[in-house]
Amino acid sequence: MQQAETLKDYSREAQTFKRRALLAFVIVVLAFMLLIGRVYFLQVIEYERYAAISDRNRIQLQPVAPRRGLIYDRQGVLLADNQPTFSVTLLREEIRDMDETLAALAELIEISERDVERFRVRLQQRRRPYESVPLRFRLTEEEIAKISVNYHMLPGVQVEADLIRYYPYGESLAHVVGYVGRINERDLQTLDPVKYAGTNYLGKLGVERFYEPILHGNVGSRKVETNARGRVLRILEQNDPAPGADIKLSLDLRLQQFTEKLLEGRRASVVALDPKTGGILALVSTPAYDPNLFVMGISNTDYDALRDDVDLPLFNRAVRGGYPPGSTIKPIMALAAIDSGSVSPDYTIWDPGYYQITPGGRRYRDWRRGGHGRVNMNLAIAQSVDTWFYDVGHRMGNEPMARYMRMFGFGEITTLDTPEAIRGVLPTADWKRGSLGEPWYPGDSVNMSIGQGFVVATPLQLAVAANVLANRGKWQQPRLLMGTVEETDAGEVLTLPDLVNEHPVPDDIKVKNPEFWDQIIQGMVDVMHGPTGTARRVGQGMEYKMAGKTGTAQVVAIPDDGRYKPEELSERHHDHALFIAFAPADDPQIALAVVVENGGGGSSVAAPIARKVMDAWLLDRYELEAEDE
């Protein structure tokens, strides 16, 4: 049977079309009304908010880093300067493809793999938002021009001008002034983010580190108008930063460099002080290094060379080198013995060349095998008679020796602005029990009396002790700073900052009889000018009177009946040569300490260096003899 043919219902289709068209029209109208409503919301209701956001995209508040304060020596010679440099930097927030940008820059200027490696490390470190990251420093004019003409193809790339630290005398002052370096992630955890906004460098060592709050200054700000790529079009408003204070040090560059020449080729240190003020005139540690290498970031090759050098040029021997002080502390031991009442000033012994705590016991040898015969205090200091000090050290015991040495600054950090200084070791019975778990033995006192055993001191501490002796117990706080420099109508004025005035100064040393100072100092004068003094040859022809004390510190132990034979030892096992002194003895103008590692005898090696330093300072004799050049 054939099915009936279905006919179209045109009327129904028309109604369906009308309904769909009406629905589409309603949807379009609603969408259009929604769009108009959104535009009204953004342009009218939220106008002020989005206008502010737009302005922030166009107008930015940028920090302005202050100029770092300059550093001068006592004569006004510039020791630490600021020099302009240009760097290419990248702003990560404006760069879509970092690798592509780096590749484009590499086609314009020379960029090494080391530059890229260090850049990526900086990029991963914590930093402030919208803070540019340097890729390469010290651009030439040609390189700056190449980058500038291609700015339109390098979003987020810019050339920035900056002032970087420069040390014109390089190695001469590395261990004194220190250096500044780039702020790293660890620094950011402790620095004030507001005060250091816009600052890329921070004092890392020495004077630069200690006086960072003074040298840094206060950050400024500026309101700038930028284009879509973030480049500054104009400055709308600026609050200038407050520059860091310029400072003047007590250091004398001429004396510093002269002393360095005397120590050239040695592992040694010299510290010289002004007894009148406590100012550090010279602080030398050799060998040294060039601090300019660290300012922009030292290369791995250069750092490895310094780190692996067997002579340790990075090590500041003057403030961190720990040495047995040897016989240089004998004047202090003599003062402790007579002032504590352990012996009288005229106490005399017979020296057969050794000392025994008990009859038949161990023999503590004197440096002269046959002994010195009858010895009093003056002769004991002048000829450095070990046996006399063994005797009085045994009589005193540990407590008086440690107490008087502490009065002279041993075991303490008494200097103001040498932040890397160590305390050394001033052994006491409690210290030995706590550190070694052993009691204090009489033999420990015997060794301590001649500056051996557990005693460890730095060259700076020895110089401080010499300074206190020069001032007959009066303390002048040792420091490098003379003051901050302020220019007034009346000329240059030096002002001491609060952090100097707030630092405690040790109490003056009061002895029972002021004549004790005369007796101790006379013994030191006889070291140089007496007929049997250990450094009498150095004192010959001297135009002023020097008070000094030689010292020789053992590096390796010698058997009781053995002899020191340097020819049988490696050079680094030779004795250390030490010397402390001040001059003129009746009106001291300079006090110093000399330590020459593995140098041998204090009288033959350290004392001649000290005399040349004093001749330079007191007599203006800066010419080197042929054997010193």
Image: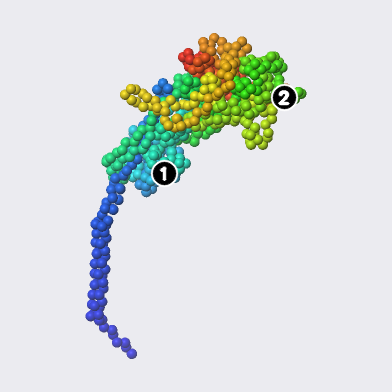
Q: Which residue occupies the extreme right position in the image?
A: 360
Q: Is residue 536 left or right of residue 365?
A: left
| Three-letter residue code for mark 1 | Arg
Q: Position of residue 214 (x, y in %)?
A: 41, 32
Is residue 562 shown to the viewer in this render? no
Helix, strand or loop under label 1: loop
Q: Which mark is residue 357?
A: 2
Vertical side of 90 occupied by 623: above or below: above
**Extreme-front residue of the structure:** 512
Q: Amino acid at mark 2?
A: Ile
Q: Are marks 1 and 2 in contact (CB under 8 Å)?
A: no
- Horizontal arrangement in the rendering, residue 115 relative to residue 339 (left or right): left
- From the image, tell me which residue sits under label 1: 127
Task: Measure the alpha-carbon separation of dots 1 and 2.
Answer: 66 Å
Rendered residue at 53%/13% (across/down): 545
Q: Secondary structure at mark 2?
A: loop
Is 625 or 118 nearer to us in this picture? 625
How many discs mark residues in the rendered view? 2
Q: Quadrant of residue 114?
A: top left
Task: Give me the residue at 34% from left, 33% from top.
Answer: 141
Residue 492 horizontal/vertical position (percent): 36, 23
The circle drawn on residue 209 is none
Please state which of residues 338 and 327 is positioned toward the viewer in this rendering.
Answer: 338
